[in-house]
Image: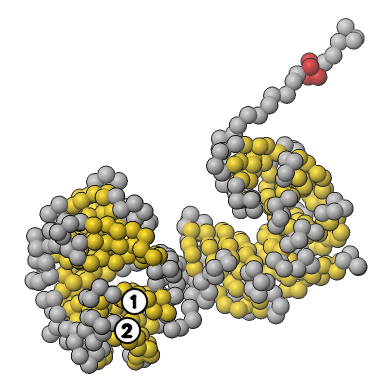
Amino acid sequence: MDNQISPEAQVAELELDAVIGFNGHVPTGLKCHPDQEHLIYPLGCTILIQAINTHEQNFLHGHENNVSCLTISTGGDYIASGQVTFMGFKADIILWDYKKRELIARLSLHKGKIEALAFSPNDLYLVSLGGPDDGSVVVWSIAKRDAICGSPAAGLNVGNATTVVFSRCRDEMFVTAGNGTIRVWELDLPNRKIWPTECRTGQTKRIVMSIGMAGDDSFFYLGTTTGDILKMNPRTKLLADAGPAKDKFSLGVSAIRWLKMGGLLVGSGAGLLVFCKSPSYKPINGTAELFATCAKKDIRVWHTSSNRELLRITVPNMTCHGIDFMRDGRSIISAWDDGKIRAFAPETGRLMYVINSAHRIGVTAIATTSDCKRVISGGGEGEVRVWQIGCQTQKLEEALKEHKSSVSCIRVKKNNEECVTASTDGTCIIWDLVRLRRNQMILANTLFQCVCYHPEEFQIITSGTDRKIAYWEVFDGSVIRELEGSLSGSINGMDITQEGVHFVTGGNDHLVKVWDYNEGEVTHVGVGHSGNITRIRISPGNQYIVSVSADGAILRWKYPFAS
């Protein structure tokens, strides 16, 4: 009996073959490798490396407890991961070789939990942040696989630091942030010390959830639990700007990335992914790279910067009066003179669905809601119709019969609870899209051709055949001011910037005009069209103005103000 081996020693280990599952609880735990071909993410104690195209999986085993954070080096050679452990025990950081898919070193100093990790831009150092029971920041040498120095991460009278980001240019500078603390650190290698400088934010007190560094280190951006973004200068350690002032990101800014093309990609706790820019930080929906036009029997999609036609959709013997992109980019909704609404796929031009007999005397105007669930159409007979758009169905929700003549323009409020329609009968009507009835009517001695909500949505601006640009109060329909929009001929198109500072108009005088909204004065004039301008639009992000005219010309103008 004495020479018998214990049962455990004879048991062979099962080999893990595949994993299906993703646990979203590790902050910024889903990473794309710099080779752009692999996803890396933790699941329990294991780290998965999964090929994006083939879904082939590799596993990194080594942690005895759940992985709490993960980072990839700039060059992609190394992966570092941290774990949680029991109170008072040391929590390991493991340095992995990405190509060999194996463990290089175990780095043990922190207690309880590793909160966050970051590699320096040239892969010389790794910085680690301990959890609430540890509270220290440590800089490790990658070459020596050893700690260089450490320090308490936050001051005495503030909360814990929870995020860290390295400089994108220098191996000696990094930033930590958390509950009431934002610090810029300098590594003093000869003396094996790190020196912190507290950033000053004045009266603004925030709990930081996420952090992103600009490519040239000019600024870093902090996402907060409040749902706004702080822009800090790492040299002066001062707050540059903060926003958005209104409509903050619900449940906080949980992820933030600076983009080479300019602007930020922001992820919120409510699951929203948004592109925005300093200083307003308002979501920029849509893209400036594509635009669509319609004329007579066809719709065309254009690549903005190269002026190339990417797609042509033709419906013989019909005339298209208006188009709109669904906000999700999956369909182009179009209004036709045969009374039908047609939806097309924007990549292929495939007909997705048709709403027959949408209007009696042709569909003259069309708009979509930002939740992609409704289409609002206007007809030659003056009816405004609200359509419910499902996966396979298109259902008429309500026909609103107030206008006496054709509907020329429709705009929907950002929250999709209200819209405004302009008509050639001399009225603009503001509709309640929840109760599906009229809220307000605006009357003028003109054939209204165009209408816009100011981004704050308490005012609308209109124009038409009387050449006047009028500002109206949404609440009671009263006129605020009138401007002389043109010396000759109707104004047919207008659009306003997302900030509401400037708007553009075009009409039968063949001129594109840029206006200052508050001053009510023209700042720029564009001369180029030889026909009547029929519609005009400002691109998302304020890069371009595109105007179209009745002679078939499409003109792209450089937006005159820095966005």
Give the tally of numbered discs. Answer: 2
Identify the disc placed on residue 528.
Answer: 2
The residue under the point 43% across, 84% down is 560
Q: Position of residue 73 (x, y in %)?
A: 71, 54
Q: Amino acid at mark 1?
A: Leu
The residue under the point 17% across, 63% down is 319
Quick one: label 1 or label 2, which is nearer the N terminus? 2
Q: Tag 2's secondary structure?
A: loop
In the figure, 497 relative to 40: above or below?
A: below
Identify residue for label 1: 555
Q: Position of residue 498 (x, y in %)?
A: 40, 74
- From the viewer's perspective, is 499 left or right of 316? right
The residue under the point 19% across, 81% down is 464
- From the viewer's perspective, is 105 left or right of 21? right
Q: Tag 1's secondary structure?
A: strand
In the figure, 171 relative to 388: above or below?
A: below
Q: CA distance from mark 1 to mark 2?
A: 8 Å
Identify the disc placed on residue 545.
Answer: none
The residue under the point 23% across, 67% down is 295
Disc 1 + disc 2, Cβ < 8 Å: yes
